[in-house]
Image (cartoon, rainbow, N blue to C red):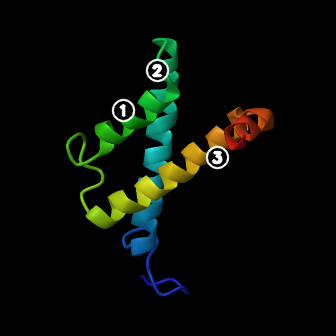
């Protein structure tokens, strides 16, 4: 049975949902890996890398398309830059300019 939106939400999903599921899986794996790596006394960057290796094409194989891997990588770079900005003191940044 078709819904008013033109697709059956129980059997057929648009392509945008598969990318959304991949991004949510990446973020979930990153959170779990970061918590695990911090408990082991390691840096959170290693947790991000471990999550990427675990669900990438050489791990569980959730990301098998190069375009999906590129989008996930871009999202991860944005998260790294955001976290770097949160953890950096402005006075430390000004010392690089001098």
Residue at horizontal 44 percent and vertical 77 percent from the top: 8
Mark nearest the camera among 2 and 1 is: 1
The residues tagged by marks 3 and 2 sit, at their Cα atoms, a distance apart of: 21 Å
Kindly indicate whether the residue at mark 1 contacts the one at mark 2 (C-beta within 8 angstroms): yes
Residue at horizontal 50 percent and vertical 44 percent from the top: 27
Kindly indicate whether the residue at mark 2 contacts the one at mark 3 (C-beta within 8 angstroms): no
Residue at horizontal 30 percent and vertical 54 percent from the top: 63
Camera-nearest residue between 68 and 79: 79
Label 3 crowd (10 A; few <14 / some 14-19 / many >=20): few
User: Residue 50 bears which disc, if any?
Assistant: 1
- Mark closest to the chain's N terminus, 2 or 1: 2
- Mark closest to the chain's N terminus, 3 or 1: 1
User: Residue 94 bears which disc, if any?
Assistant: none
Instruction: Provide the residue designation for mark 3.
Output: 82
Label 2 crowd (10 A; few <14 / some 14-19 / many >=20): some
In percent of width and height, residue 39 lies at 51, 13
């Amino acid at each position: 049975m078709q819904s008013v939106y033109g697709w059956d939400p129980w059997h057929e999903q648009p392509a945008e949902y598969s990318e959304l599921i991949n991004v949510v899986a990446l973020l979930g794996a990153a959170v779990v890996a970061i918590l695990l790596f911090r408990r082991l006394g390691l840096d959170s960057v290693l947790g991000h890398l471990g999550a990427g290796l675990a669900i990438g094409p050489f791990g569980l194989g959730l990301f098998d398309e190069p375009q999906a891997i590129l989008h996930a990588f871009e999202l991860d770079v944005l998260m790294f830059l955001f976290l770097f900005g949160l953890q950096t003191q402005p006075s430390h940044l000004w010392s690089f300019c001098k």
